[in-house]
Image (spheres, rainbow, N blue to C red):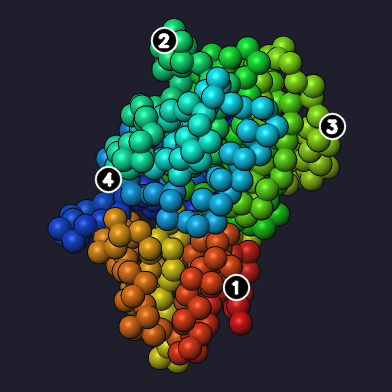
Amino acid sequence: MKCRHCHSPLTLPLVDLATSPPSNAYLRTDQLDSPERWYPLRVLVCEHCWLVQTEDFTQADQLFDADYAYFSSFSDAWLKHAQAYVTTMIDRFDLSATHRVVEIASNDGYLLQYVKAAGIPCYGIEPTASTAAAARAKGIESIERFFGTALADELSTAGRQADLIAANNVLAHVPDINDFVAGFARLLTPAGVATFEFPHLLKLLEHCQFDTIYHEHFSYLSLTAVARIFEANGLQVFDVEEWPTHGGSLRVFAQRAGGPHDVSPAVTAMLARETQAGLTQRDAYHSFQARAEAIKNAFVSFLLECKARGERVAAYGAAAKGNTLINFAGIRADLLAYVVDRNPAKQGKFLPGSRIPIVSPEHLIADQPAWIVILPWNLRDEVIGQMAEARQWGARFVTAIPDLAVHA
Ligand SMILES: [Zn+2]
């Protein structure tokens, strides 16, 4: 396989997580007597541009189907993050009713609802039918297409260029990263700004967050790789911030090459930090496999011990992270009885691969299991807050990554 950005041959492995189905391919009851497609889940490192990427084998349109059930608005913490983002951008870039904001992967309108409320014209681009429909129900125009140069050119020609483009947690999810990034340079106004948020590769390596790896997540990004990819596609990074979201993310600010914003010293500083951490050397990537296996083994041991003691274990959060961990560890409903999710679209379905049932929070409260494994460890405090009632029957909360930890 060749690098998705620079086309160099990929020879350096990061991790091999065996095989699993697409992480968002939740099953309905009537699908349980049908087989599932399992794909290899391997991550490779480009030693030329340092883009870390999943091995290539499926098309994006097979991975994101119409049943795709992730609705951003089901996380309170994420909604707050989106609202704060909108306020900050309006302030920093003096956005008003004469400007236009566009969001790529606008989901159910979780972010643009705040732009609309501020009286700034906006529209979203969202290829997933169910979430785009939810955004339209909030009065937010949603173009149901994949973003890239073709769509950017159409919109620009139609006079629909953007003064601000928000792209939160989408850059890592596009297979053709060059065409995607080039689209921003074409859709922005000459002084326009695009912001990108993505989980930081530095944190993935530091905390062995291997469960953030899944098929639909094609790239694992450093500023080093992003700056290079942007430059090759007509964009320039002019600022970067660190955020605690998703276990440690970067928010990168970019403009068209030659745009009006000065490059912040934060950019040089982050590039230097990544170099110091060894991200541009082979050695930084070598121990990851053994560390991921140690975490998996500790989690399986914990579940086996609970089983031996006759203690029921449930999980919270039917999201991609959990599916990677559960399928890599080969866990089934005999060890992890069910997973709770607040999203009604997921309740009554089953996790892909493991086929562990997804139930409502009310089910967990009635069942009173001894342990609750929080699969989205990045939302740990939010989940513990939501499930405070579980303390009354003595349930304990557990996270598996970066180390098995009990939260008293
Ligand atoms: Zn490369």
Q: Is residue 218 above or below residue 4?
A: below
Q: Residue furthest bottom?
A: 309
The residue beneath circle 3 is: 265
Pointer 4 or 1: first along the chain: 4
Q: Which mark is residue 155?
A: none
**Precedes in sequence: disc 1 or disc 2:** 2
Residue marked by disc 2: 158
- What is the spatial separation of the Cα atoms under label 3 and label 4, in whole angstroms? 44 Å
Q: Secondary structure at mark 2?
A: loop
Is 355 on the left or on the right of 308, as rendered?
left
**Vertical placement of 385 versus 293: above or below?**
below
Q: Say which of 43 and 131 sits in front.
A: 131
Q: Amino acid at mark 4?
A: Asp
Q: Mark 1 near mark 3, Cβ–Cβ under 8 Å?
A: no
Decide if residue 326 is on the left or right side of residue 285.
left
Which of the marked residues, 4 or 2, is nearer the chain's N terminus?
A: 4
Residue 186 x/y as whole percent: 54, 13
Number of the front mark, 4 or 1: 4
- Per the image, label 1 sits on a secondary structure element best described as loop
Q: Which residue is mark 1?
A: 404
Give the amino acid at mark 3.
Answer: Pro
Q: Residue at x 53, y 36 (%)?
A: 118
Closer to us: mark 3 or mark 2? 2
* Mark-to-mark CA distance, 1 and 3: 38 Å
